[in-house]
Image (spheres, rainbow, N blue to C red):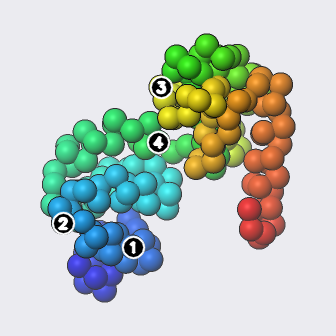
Amino acid sequence: MSAENASPESKAVFSAALQARLDALATKYPVKRSALVPMLLYAQDEVGYLSDAVIAEVARRIGITELEVRNVATYYSLLRFKPAGQFNIQVCTNISCMLRGAYEVYERFQEELGVGQKGVTRDGVFSLEEVECIGACCWAPAIQVNYDFLDDVKPDQVPGILQVYRAKEGAREKGGNA
């Protein structure tokens, strides 16, 4: 389905650019369902989270049920069902990271941000979550901020990490590229 022929509901959910990207993505796989996770990530990047409307539209586009979409989406910690901050901080606390101080890193983020698990700061700039694994065991403890990986993180580095992302947020507000 091209962006011009999209249903009115999909036009309300996704921009024309994202609709075109999802249409192209669906043609790259022999089985449309294989495009599910990339579609969800692109949709989440645009909308901010996987709303009911997003799930319904993605399901419609690849011909599966909304329940099937939710079953897949709940498996991945990178996908979320409620709005997160502009910068979503994920702290891995799986065994490798835990043994190298991940809980101390996570606690420092909680202190600095004033939020707990899946909390969002009042200004909406940061959200925080403890996750099971981000696949960076060799570089533990590791965190992920949106799509940026940071490794060998120590608790005393947390304020500096937050300062870097605050500066990026400030640059965006002023119309710069961050």
Which quadrant holds the N terminus? Answer: bottom left
Q: Is residue 106 above or below residue 18?
A: above
Q: Is residue 42 above or below residue 84?
A: below
Which quarter of the figure has residue 159?
top right
Residue shown at 33% from the left, 81% from the top: 3
Spot the residue most to the front. Answer: 138
Residue nearest the viewer, comparing 3 with 77? 77
Residue at numbered disc 3 = 132
Q: How far, Cα to Cα, is label 3 from label 1?
A: 30 Å
Residue at disc 4, secondary structure: loop
Residue at disc 3, secondary structure: loop
Amino acid type at image mark 1: Arg
Residue at numbered disc 4 = 78
Q: How far, Cα to Cα, is label 3 from label 2?
A: 31 Å
Residue at disc 2, secondary structure: loop
Amino acid type at image mark 3: Glu
Q: Is residue 143 visible?
A: yes
| First of labels 4, 2 by sequence position | 2
Residue at numbered disc 1 = 21
Which quarter of the figure has residue 106?
top right
Which quadrant holds the C terminus? Answer: bottom right
Spot the residue most to the bottom. Answer: 4
- Callout in the foreground (2, 1): 2
Residue shown at 33% from the left, 42% from the top: 73
Residue at disc 1, secondary structure: helix
Residue at numbered disc 2 = 30
